[in-house]
Image: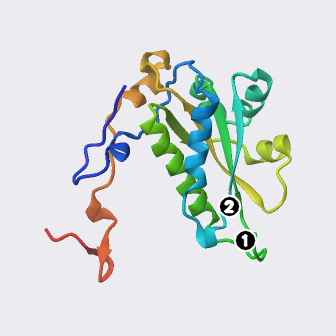
Amino acid sequence: MEKSADSAYLIHELIRNRWSPRSFTDMMPSQSQLLSLFEAARWAPSCYNDQPWFFIVATKENPKEYEKMLSCLVEQNRIWARQAPVLVISVARITFSLNGKPNAHAFHDLGMSIQNIALQATGMGLAIHPMAGFSKKCTRETYNIPEGYDPVTALAIGFPGDPNTLPAALREKEMEPRQRKSLKDFIFACTWGENFISE
């Protein structure tokens, strides 16, 4: 299923075609495909090139580890995410490695790396669905995450599947057209709220 963005201006096809499905096939991405995603993450920009991103990966090839990670998701996400053959939890180091000072840009930089994963996945026929709905407490305890590192986002990764495999309410969401704010709603000039785009 494709859900290309109805963009007001020209954007790259990878951006146009990237979206976050809830339905996945049971086909497992290869090891090299998964490593290509994380290689893309590796080349994301970061403040001072500190690269504060880390990823914990679980695949259905190891059912025990997969169920362990699945258990950290909220029930609402477990309903559909269990279709995905790969689950990931991203973690940000919240201090700079060079001096130990707080890194206010760590979450931003982690987000950049996840967007690289998303675009790489799109180019390979894969998809990712980022999730805020998971337990940080469960993740910390399950994976012994040390102080100074913060679990930020869970990801479901796989090949997009058939929306008809989802429960009715989720299927309806899956089929909805993608929507975004208008550019005029968030691009300002001169002062806050003043439209950058000339009418």
Q: Quadrant of residue 95?
A: bottom right
Q: Amino acid at mark 1?
A: Phe
The residue labelled by disc 2 is 52
Q: Quadrant of residue 103?
A: bottom right
Q: Quadrant of the N terminus?
A: top left
Residue 180: percent from the left, percent from the top? 33, 50
Residue 13: percent from the left, percent from the top? 32, 44
Q: Residue at x 52, y 37 (%)?
A: 128
Q: Residue at x 37, y 47 (%)?
A: 15
Residue closer to the observer: 106 or 30 = 30
Disc sitting over residue 96 in the figure: 1
Q: Amino acid at mark 2?
A: Pro
For marks 2 and 1, the one nearer the N-term is: 2
Residue closer to the observer: 146 or 57 = 57
Specify the farthest residue to the front. Answer: 32
Tag 1 secondary structure: loop
Q: CA distance from mark 2 to mark 1?
A: 8 Å
Q: Quadrant of the C terminus?
A: bottom left
Residue closer to the observer: 33 or 88 = 33
Category of crowding for the residue at label 2, using alpha-carbon neighbours closer than 10 angstroms: few (below 14), some (14–19), many (at least 20): many
Residue 194: percent from the left, percent from the top? 27, 76
Q: Residue at x 34, y 40 (%)?
A: 178
Left or right: 184, with 41 as reference point: left
Category of crowding for the residue at label 1, using alpha-carbon neighbours closer than 10 angstroms: few (below 14), some (14–19), many (at least 20): many
* Display coloring: rainbow
Report if residue 132 is visible in the image: no
